[in-house]
Image: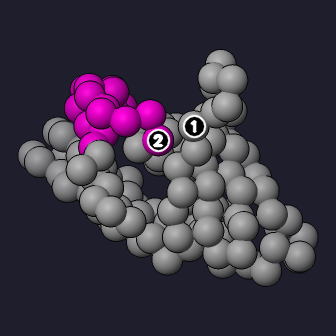
Amino acid sequence: MKIVKFIYDNSSYDYNYGNSIDIEILGRFLRDDTPHFLNDYKEWALADPNTEYGVSCSGNCTFLENDNGTIYLEDQYSEEKIPTRLKISREQFIKILDEWDQKVVNADPKPKEVIIKQENDKFFIETKN
């Protein structure tokens, strides 16, 4: 099981632990790139890539590519010779965006701890207060 964990410090979530580069990329994407553009990423993932949305997009720290319903996330600033990529199905991508929105962005009070997990091809978020 791959995990990345963030701790809330009363204003933002700070990185606490990760056991794999690819799941850390997803964590940074959710934490840094989605706060104001979460619905835009969902629309992009659901759109036909031949429309105005195109097959790729990027945020502050993440490059995303849509390859026929498989979403790839990559650290834009990776210094790896061959950058690590997270592979996630469109359905799981939308699901994790929805969970992040419900369990973290719109949570009141904000959870003290957020753990993003990947087991096989399934992604989910656990929170602790």
**x 41%, y 43%: residue:** 23
Q: Closest to the observer: 13 or 118?
A: 118
Residue identifier under label 2? 22
Q: Does 96 appear above or below 108?
A: below
Position of residue 40 measured from the top left corner of the image (x, y, whole percent): 66, 63
**x 58%, y 44%: residue:** 85
Position of residue 49 measured from the top left corner of the image (x, y, whole percent): 81, 73
Mark positioned earlier in the residue sequence (1 or 2): 2
Q: Closest to the observer: 23 or 28?
A: 23
Residue identifier under label 1? 84
Magenta highlight range = 3-22
Position of residue 107 measured from the top left corner of the image (x, y, whole percent): 27, 57
**x 64%, y 33%: residue:** 83
Q: Does 4 appear above or below 103?
A: above
Q: Does 38 appear above or below 32?
A: below
Question: From this viewpoint, is residue 27 visible?
Answer: no
Q: Does 17 appear above or below 58?
A: above
Q: Is 110 contained in the magenta span?
A: no
**For the residue carrying disc 2, how many other residues have a C-alpha within 10 Å: few (<14), some (14-19), or many (20+)?**
many
Disc 1, SS:
loop
Which residue is situated farthest in the top direction here? Answer: 79
Disc 2, SS:
helix
Cβ atoms under marks 1 and 2 closer than 8 Å:
yes
| Amino acid marked by disc 1 | Thr
Q: Closest to the observer: 101 or 20?
A: 20
Indicate the quadrant where residue 11 lies. top left
Which residue is situated farthest in the left direction here? Answer: 129
